[in-house]
Amino acid sequence: MIGQLGRLLRYPVKSLLGEELTAVEVSPAGLTGDRRLALVHRTTGRVASAKNPHRWRALTTIRATGGHPGPVRLILPDGRALAADDECLDETLSALLGEPVTLADRVPPNAVVERSRPESVLAAGIDVPVPVEESRLGTAAPPGSFVDFAPVHLLTTATLDRLGAAVPAGAVDPIRYRPNLVVDTAGDGFEENDWIGRDLRVGPELVLRLVAPTPRCAVPTLAHGSLPRDPDALRAPARLNRLAPLPGMAPQPCVGAYAQVVRPGRIRLGDPVRLG
């Protein structure tokens, strides 16, 4: 056993804040209810993502909860809560974000997101437009969800401790990296790099296969709810863990790992985690 499941998180709407869970079913598409909705720009058809913080940084001030069971609810920065099917939702969110958006439950054909170059964001700040790249969604996931790449994203507390030791604040909140699973482990950190290509067993049923380190964009630097903006959440991995996420890609700051689901199952906080 390498550790145990310490935190379990779901994000019902892509790029919005999510919710903590104590247990959840995991299918080949990922956690039940995770990133099954997204905001889509009504003019361009692009999926709204805080990876382009100049345009979409306000996304991480909105929280989404529920969906399985019950309806998805969105909690706005002023505390108002709206159901996903509220007839005023699109108008309210468009006013808040300053962009015409609609909440979608189906991935648009050839869906893409805009990703700002993280080094450019660090240099210029989030208020300045910087070059963006377009990327396809869910290229290592079954169709039907708005995940960036693969269905599950995880990281370890050892990696968080390593990052915390490298930043002035002395700690980095895992929420900044938007994991689904936080595995309590001991060690020097970044052990996720060594798990790529291996199976990870969580609890008695779930088997994941780690497929790639997770490249970090500007999202960890943004304010997340009550967490203030923190550029060091990206600067630290840029110093400590730069590597190519996939063959042919340039080295990038990485934290955590993406995983595909080999065998579905239900997982719970405290479940043992083992390398297969």
Image: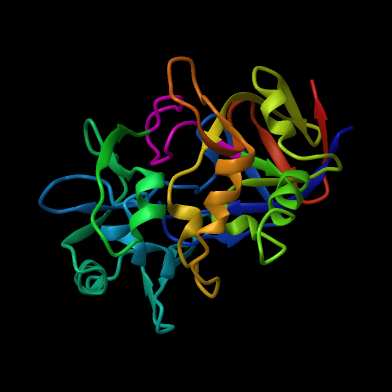
- Residue 199 sits in which quadrant? top right
Q: Nearer the viewer, residue 164 or 53?
A: 164
Task: Find out whether residue 59 is within the magenta segment.
Answer: no
Residue that appears at 43% across and 15% down: 248
**Is residue 262 in view?**
no
- Front one among 60 and 171: 171
Q: How is the image coloured?
A: rainbow
Where residue 153 appears, as percent x and y from the top left, is: 58, 39
Query: Quarter holding the C terminus?
Result: top right
Quarter of the image for the N terminus: give it. Answer: top right
By secondary structure, the bulk of the magenta-drawn segment is best described as loop
- Closer-to-camera residue (71/50): 50
Q: Say above or below: 203 vs 232.
A: above
Q: Residue furthest right?
A: 1
163 horizontally vs 101: left or right: right
In x, y percent, where is residue 141? 45, 28
Q: Which residues are magenta?
A: 138-153
Q: x and y percent of residue 7 in the render?
A: 71, 53
Which quarter of the picture shows residue 203?
top right
Whether 139 is among the magenta residues is yes
Q: Eyeballing the image, is 77 above or below 264?
A: below
The vertical placement of 153 against 247, above or below, is below
Q: Is residue 43 left or right of residue 32?
A: left
In the rendered image, residue 173, in percent from the top left (x then y), is placed at 64, 60
| Picture mark count | 0
- Residue at the location (44% across, 62% down)? 71
Q: Residue furthest left?
A: 43
Q: Quick check: can you spot residue 204? A: yes
> In screen coordinates, is 232 left or right of 60?
right
Q: Residue at x 54, y 35 (%)?
A: 214
